[in-house]
Every structure is written in structure tokens, then in C-alpha cells.
Amino acid sequence: MLLLPSRHRRPDRHATKAGSRASKAGFSLAELMGVVVVMGLIAGIVSVNFMSSLPRAQLNSTIHEISAAVAGARSDAIARNGEFRIYYDIDADTFHVKSPFKLGGGLAIREEDRVVVKRGILPEHLSFVRITIDGIEYTDGIVFVSFTPLGSATGHTINLMSSPTEKVTTVEVLPLTGLVRFHYMDYQRDIVTEEDFD
């Protein structure tokens, strides 16, 4: 005679797992506070790093903006066969490019009739320290440099100061070629004299 095992009702495995999940669901207050503290620390570090890198980023942006104004003035002078000028307002920490043409076309006879083709303003933590044109230093007022149809430029250096560090950066525009060089320091190129060729 063959005996068959009696069927025992097994506990429902799915019901047991669901019950254990329900008892473990959610986070404790201590875990949530730990996450909040870690997120706060990360946000603080990111904020400090961003604030410290912002002045350097604005300085680089300003240098590139001035460089673009110089390159644009030189290029326009060659292409349009006229003398373009960049005016630096040292007191107001602004600059602008003027074409030799008046509004509506034709050459401007008076200085005030020249059309402004580009304007720039320094960020509030940057300022002009001095503009040196052909060896002469200017620390206030409005000065200008010229770009000719032959591609030459008035050689000049622009010294910018960052606050609150008071670090000086120099933008140098080479005469003849109009090429721009950057120096992350207070830089002045020595004036070449006849004695240098002896």
C-alpha cells in the first residue's frame, strides 16, 4: 500500500516578504538628518569654490573682450580702409571703439561724429590702473589708440587691478602688428632706443 504524504499548507512566502518590507520601509530621523548635513557640506564647498573662481573668470572674460575689441578694430581698419580708434575711459572703467565714419555713411570730419561700433564696461571688481601709450603713462581721463588701414596699431599696455586682492594684470598691444599679449602681473615693456642697437 502506497502512502501519500499529507499536504501541509505552507505559509505564503510573498505575504511574509511583504510584511518584512513594510516594517523596514522609510528612513529614520537620524538618517535623514545625516543626509541633510552631508548635502549642506557639499553645497558649502561648491559655493566657496565658485565664489573664489568667479573673479578670475570675470578677469579672463574681460581680457578676452578687450582683445576682441583690439582685433576687431584692427581688422575693420584694414577691411574698410580707415582709421579706427579705441577710447579708454580710465575714470569710468569703460572703453569703446569708434569708426572713422559718420552715421549714414561718409567720413566723419569731427570727432564727435564718429560712430561707436562697440562698447565695453569692466566688472565692478576690476578697474583700470593705467594705460601706457608709446611710453607715456595715463592714470585718469580718456585716452585713445589708433589702428590704421595698413594693419599697424598704436602700441599700448592696459593695466587692470582686481579687488580686493589688488593683483594687477597687463594686456599688451604690440605696435605695428596689433597683436595682443597677456601678462598675469604688472608688466611694462622696455622702450627700445637707439642705444639698444649699438
Image (cartoon, rainbow, N blue to C red):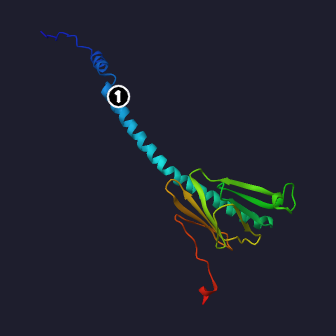
| Image quarter of residue 179 | bottom right
- Percent across and percent down for residue 109 are 86, 63
Q: Residues within 10 Å of mark 1 (few under 14, many from 20)?
A: few
For residue 162, above or below residue 17:
below
- Percent across and percent down for residue 42 are 40, 40
Q: Nearer the viewer, residue 110 or 43?
A: 110
Q: Which residue is farthest bottom?
A: 198
Give amino acid for label 1: Leu
| Image quarter of residue 78 | bottom right
- Percent across and percent down for residue 75 are 72, 64
Q: Nearer the viewer, residue 115 or 130?
A: 130
Q: In the rendered image, is residue 103 in sight?
A: yes
| Left or right side of 77 for 58 | left
Q: In the rendered image, is residue 72 in sight?
A: no
Q: Which residue is farthest front?
A: 140
Reading the image, the residue beneath label 1 is 32
Q: How many numbered discs?
A: 1
Q: Where is the C terminus found, in terms of image quarters?
A: bottom right
Q: Secondary structure at mark 1?
A: helix
Q: Where is the N terminus found, in terms of image quarters?
A: top left
| Left or right side of 10 for 73 | right
| Image quarter of residue 134 | bottom right
Q: Nearer the viewer, residue 186 or 181?
A: 186
- Percent across and percent down for residue 181 are 59, 67
Q: Nearer the viewer, residue 21 or 84?
A: 84
For residue 163, above or below residue 170:
above
Residue ID at (71%, 72%): 152
Q: Which residue is farthest left?
A: 1
